[in-house]
Image: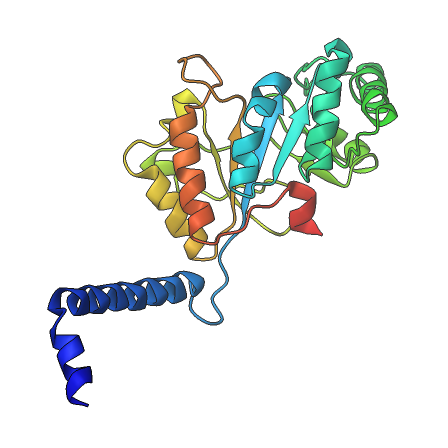
């Protein structure tokens, strides 16, 4: 008993270090428990649906490591497939194999004209829709979703598209400004589930004025959010999103335990 007491008091610094490390271990354990319990019992967060438009396959693929790092699931709406190289088509297949979704955005990215005659409607369906979808499907791409190019939605063609695709998306995305942030859009006109939908291009003022925090607040409150972007680059060009801003938000969503979903996955 006496010798045991002397051995402890002989190394007071060691005892202090042991106490310090024990305290740190307890704090880390409690933090881990708190992180596991990201949402109160019975509270379900919203899902984040990331959609990406057009033909920037090389750009998307260059961020594949980051997509996987944050367990992201994206839906890529592809146009101009007939102009893509074999390497670009292989990248789309690889994205699909890794759990992302490849969707359709017309062949030539020609916006729909609400004044089309019946013959023009038939030609549009034949060329822009059916022939293009056949090209993607012949390469092994599973096409279930469609999006109009441009800010267009027309009920005259909607039923034709519903006969061809499981999910038809409008392009009416809100912009990232305070006065619009609470506006809800019917991302899929035939679905009951609304989204808060925002474009993340330069004109949207993404990541300014605390918009990222507002998105997180929506998701934490159980609201589903859809975010549209086209390409990721530090160059300030139309239809581009700053990668640092984008992945800054993505990291917060991931760390909060908020799920990502493809369009088809959301409605599954």
Residue 261 image position (x, y, % from top left)? 60, 45
Residue 128 image position (x, y, % from top left)? 78, 17
Residue 201 image position (x, y, % from top left)? 45, 23
Q: Nearer the viewer, residue 174 or 265?
A: 265
Q: Nearer the viewer, residue 26 or 141?
A: 26
Residue 264 image position (x, y, % from top left)? 70, 44
> Splitting the image into 4 quarters, where does residue 8 fall?
bottom left
Question: How many marks on residues?
Answer: 0
- In this rendering, the answer to whether 46 lies above or below 80 is below
Q: What residue do we see at 79% from left, 30% from top?
A: 141
Is there any visible trace of residue 190 in the rendered image? no
> Splitting the image into 4 quarters, where does residue 111 fall?
top right
Is there any visible trace of residue 240 in the rendered image? yes
**Residue furthest front in the image:** 3
Q: Nearer the viewer, residue 25 or 190?
A: 25
- In this rendering, the answer to whether 116 lies above or below 35 is above
Q: What residue do we see at 16% from left, 67% from top?
A: 16
Q: Is residue 58 left or right of residue 203?
A: right
**Residue furthest bottom in the image:** 1
Q: What residue do we see at 56% from left, 46% from top?
A: 260
Q: Is residue 145 left or right of residue 28?
A: right
Q: Is residue 141 left or right of residue 241?
A: right
């Amino acid at each position: 008993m006496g010798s045991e007491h002397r051995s402890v008091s002989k190394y007071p610094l060691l005892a202090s270090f042991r106490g310090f490390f024990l305290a740190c271990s307890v704090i880390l354990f409690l933090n881990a428990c708190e992180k596991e319990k990201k949402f109160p019992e019975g509270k379900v967060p919203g899902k984040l649906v990331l959609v990406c438009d057009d033909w920037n396959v090389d750009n998307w693929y260059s961020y594949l490591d980051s997509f996987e790092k944050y367990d992201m699931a994206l839906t890529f709406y592809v146009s101009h497939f007939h102009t893509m190289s074999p390497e670009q088509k292989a990248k789309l297949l690889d994205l699909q194999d890794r759990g992302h979704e490849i969707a359709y955005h017309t062949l030539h990215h020609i916006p729909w004209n609400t004044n089309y005659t019946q013959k023009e409607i038939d030609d549009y369906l034949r060329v822009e829709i059916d022939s293009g979808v056949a090209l993607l499907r012949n390469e092994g791409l599973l096409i279930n979703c469609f999006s109009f190019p441009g800010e267009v939605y027309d009920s005259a063609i909607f039923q034709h598209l519903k006969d061809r695709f499981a999910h038809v998306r409008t392009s009416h995305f809100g912009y990232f400004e305070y006065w619009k942030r609470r506006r809800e859009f019917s991302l899929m006109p035939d679905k009951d589930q609304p989204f808060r939908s925002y474009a993340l291009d330069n004109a949207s003022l993404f990541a300014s004025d605390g918009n990222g925090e507002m998105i997180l607040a929506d998701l934490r409150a159980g609201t589903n959010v859809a975010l549209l972007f086209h390409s990721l680059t530090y160059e300030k060009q139309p239809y581009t999103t700053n990668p640092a801003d984008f992945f800054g938000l993505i990291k917060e969503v991931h760390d909060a335990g908020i799920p990502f979903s493809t369009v088809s996955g959301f409605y599954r």
